[in-house]
Amino acid sequence: AMRHSDEDTEIHVKNGTYKENIYIASGVELYGENRDEVIVKAKNDDEPTVKMYHKSKINKITVQDGEDGILVDDGAKVSIIDCLIKDNDRAGINIEEGEVKDKKLVSISENEIRNNKKTGIYSETRKLSLINNSIEENGGDGIIIAKNSSAWIEGNKIEDNDKSGMKLVLD
């Protein structure tokens, strides 16, 4: 279904374990039946388990075993909601650089991001919204946000990461 999807497509995923690397095309929304029962494991662990493009969304899916759990393409506006992102070789979520504008907002809410070998959330310069996430037990920092970013950060639980809870690079 992913290969044949185009903008304004919703894909609903049944419970199960899927071993593949997923590329969510622009405008595509991916919904799992149950976050703990829809599991996507990277087939190639030298790539992100999920790569998201502009105006894409992922909701209620476990993402694990990739180089990064989720890689957000440069400049893409995306939403990551109620996912479990764990056991990845680098970051749970890695956000490439983009404009610091509402039309390029990366919205991350209600997720559990844990046990990634490096950072929970790593962001280059972007506009971010991080609300009500649990970011715990990662091998590096909980959150790293690059200089010139704009971020709304509210209600997150950030604890037991091996380095800092949050690292912000100031202008």
Image (cartoon, rainbow, N blue to C red):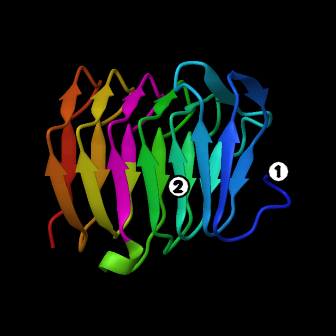
Say which residue label 1 marks. Answer: 1
Q: Are discs 1 and 2 less than 8 Å apart at CB?
A: no
Compared to residue 162, the image places residue 124 above or below, namely below
Q: Position of residue 110 (x, y in %)?
A: 32, 37
Classify mark 1: residues with Cα within 10 Å, few (<14), some (14-19) or many (20+): few
Q: Is residue 100 visible?
A: no
Q: Which mark is residue 57?
A: 2
Look at the image and tell me in which quarter the C terminus lies. Answer: bottom left
Q: Position of residue 116 (x, y in %)?
A: 47, 28
Closest to the observer, 4 or 167: 4
Q: Position of residue 47 (x, y in %)?
A: 70, 45
**Residue at horizontal 56%, vertical 53%?**
71
Residue 134 on the magenta span: no
**Residue at horizontal 56%, vertical 65%?**
73
| Span shown in magenta | 105-121
Residue 106 on the magenta span: yes
Q: Is residue 138 left or right of residue 56?
A: left
Q: Is residue 83 left or right of residue 141?
A: right
Q: CA distance from mark 1 to mark 2?
A: 15 Å
Closest to the observer, 130 or 124: 130
Q: Give the SS element for disc 1.
A: loop
At label 1, the amino acid type is Ala
Could you say which quadrant of the image residue 124 lies in?
bottom left
